[in-house]
Image (tube, grey):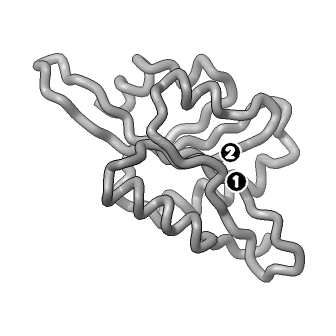
Amino acid sequence: MSPIGLTEGCRDALHHLRQTREINTVILRFADTPGALALALAPELEGNLTHDELVSALPADQARLVVHELTFATPEGARRHELLLVLWMPADAEAQEEIYTAGYTFLKEHLPDVHVHLTARRQDQLEYRRLVALAG
């Protein structure tokens, strides 16, 4: 398999998410770069999405990688923000599993400040309370 990298747009989007806090979600896909020596992740969407908008933005038949800042309240009432890295791998995207799993592994190493990692194959695996429990 080819090495994996980030497009400049991907680096900018991740920096924007982690530093400026104007957006809370970056959805990534592999860029179509014929003849490239490395596979490159590119931003497909960056925005300030609600939980429902995030789930709706994921394609039903294609894999994606998602970096999302989850905002929630602790049982004590304190506001928390936790970055999540999600490998979205619906059943119809099995042909993309190897490449997106490699991208997921690459991002886990590239984003050491993201401590919550999960693979979701169905939308119910991204249910808000489940994400909060993982982040909590």
Q: Looking at the image, is 54 positioned above or below residue 98?
A: above
- Residue at image point 45% right, 39% down: 48
Q: Residue 40 appears in which quarter of the rendering? A: bottom right
**Circle 2 SS class:** strand
* Left/right of residue 107 with respect to residue 59 in the rendered view: left
Badge number at residue 115:
none
Q: Quadrant of the C terminus?
A: top left
Residue 64 numbered mark, or none: 2
In this rendering, position of residue 65 left or right of residue 90: left
Tell which circle, 1 or 2, labels the residue nearer the N-terminal end: 1
In the rendered view of the protein, which quadrant contains the N terminus? bottom right
Residue at position x 53%, y 60% from top? Answer: 107
- Asked if the residues shown at circle 1 and circle 2 are in contact, with their CB atoms under 8 angstroms apart, the answer is yes
Q: Decide if residue 32 is on the left or right side of residue 112.
A: right
Q: Is residue 2 above or below residue 59?
A: below
Give the vertical position of 112 relative to 118 (above or below): below
Residue on which disc 1 sits: 29
Residue located 39% across and 41% down the image: 69
Q: Nearer the viewer, residue 134 or 41?
A: 41
| Residue 100, position as x, y percentages in the image | 71, 52
Tell me which amino acid carries mark 1.
Arg
Q: CA distance from mark 1 to mark 2?
A: 5 Å
Report the residue at 49% width, 67% height from top.
Answer: 12
Please say if 39 is above or below 130.
below
